[in-house]
Every structure is written in C-alpha cells, then in structure tokens.
Image (tube, helix red, strand yellow):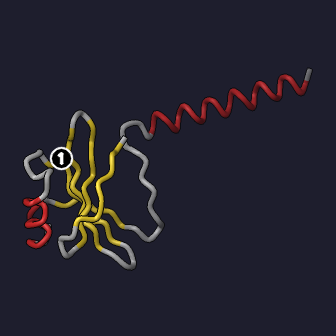
C-alpha cells in the first residue's frame, strides 16, 4: 500500500512539474543555446548595412519584422529577424557579413 501511495505522489508531482514547465515556455519555441551565447534585442538601426542589404534582398523582406536579435558567442555574430509567416513565427538568421545562415520555425 505504501508503494502505491508513493508511486501516485511521484506521478502527480512529475505531472505538475511538466505542466508548469509547458505553460512557462508556451509560445517561446524551443531554442537550444550554449552558455556562451549572448542574445540581445536590437533595432534595425543597430544592424550593419551589409546585413540590412541581405535582408532587403531576402524572400521575407516584405513581411513585418517583430523583433531583431544580435546573438554573440565566442566564435560568431549572428543577426536574427523574427517575422510572422503563414500564421507561425519564423526566425531568419544572417551572419555579420550578410550571408544567409538558416530559417527556423519558432513554436
């Protein structure tokens, strides 16, 4: 009987923690980054001209930019543009030379 009660308490606790984690992260997407990454929200005025030029030539340039981030780590500097695309958020990344890196869906 004790094992049954302890098992039920463990399952209830795990379920509560899982629901709490899910609600805290709701709408933020899954972003994996290293401890050395530093992500800072910036404005279009802070974006280097070469990256602005690459953005203006991209397929997403006609869409409204919600946010722009500068992501720095030990070896790279990335500019990330967050836009709404077909009812979902998408992050478009460029390096500091304006080279397109990737597009990723944000959940």
Residue 11 percent across, percent down from the top left: 72, 29
Q: Is residue 68 above or below residue 3?
A: below
Q: Residues within 10 Å of mark 1 (few under 14, many from 20)?
A: few
Name the residue rendered at 68%, 31% in the picture.
Answer: 13
Q: Is residue 63 above or below residue 13?
A: below
Q: Give the position of the C terminus as an image quadrant.
A: top left
Q: Give the position of the N terminus as an image quadrant.
A: top right
Examine the image and state in which quarter residue 7 appears.
top right
Name the residue rendered at 58%, 35% in the picture.
Answer: 18
Residue nearest the observer in this picture, 36 or 85: 85
Residue 72 percent across, percent down from the top left: 33, 71
Examine the image and state in which quarter residue 70 appears.
bottom left
Residue 36 percent across, percent down from the top left: 44, 71
The residue at the far top in this view is 1
Question: In the shown orientation, is residue 44 left or right of residue 19?
Answer: left
Residue beneath disc 1? 66
Name the residue rendered at 18%, 71% in the picture.
Answer: 98
Residue nearest the observer in this picture, 45 or 86: 86
Name the residue rendered at 11%, 45% in the picture.
Answer: 64
Residue 24 percent across, percent down from the top left: 45, 38
Label 1 sits on a secondary structure element that is strand
What is the number of callouts on the image?
Answer: 1
Question: In the shown orientation, is residue 92 left or right of residue 10?
Answer: left
Question: In the shown orientation, is residue 53 left or right of residue 66?
Answer: left
The residue at the far right in this view is 1
């Amino acid at each position: 009987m004790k094992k049954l009660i302890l098992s039920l308490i463990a399952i209830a606790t795990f379920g509560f923690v899982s629901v709490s984690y899910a609600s805290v992260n709701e709408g933020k997407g899954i972003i994996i980054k290293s401890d050395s990454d530093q992500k800072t929200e910036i404005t279009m005025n802070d974006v280097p001209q070469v990256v602005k030029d690459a953005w203006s030539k991209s397929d997403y340039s006609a869409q409204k930019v919600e946010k722009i981030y500068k992501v720095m780590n030990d070896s790279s500097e990335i500019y990330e543009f967050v836009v709404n695309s077909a009812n979902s958020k998408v992050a478009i990344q460029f390096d500091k030379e304006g080279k397109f890196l990737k597009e990723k869906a944000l959940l």
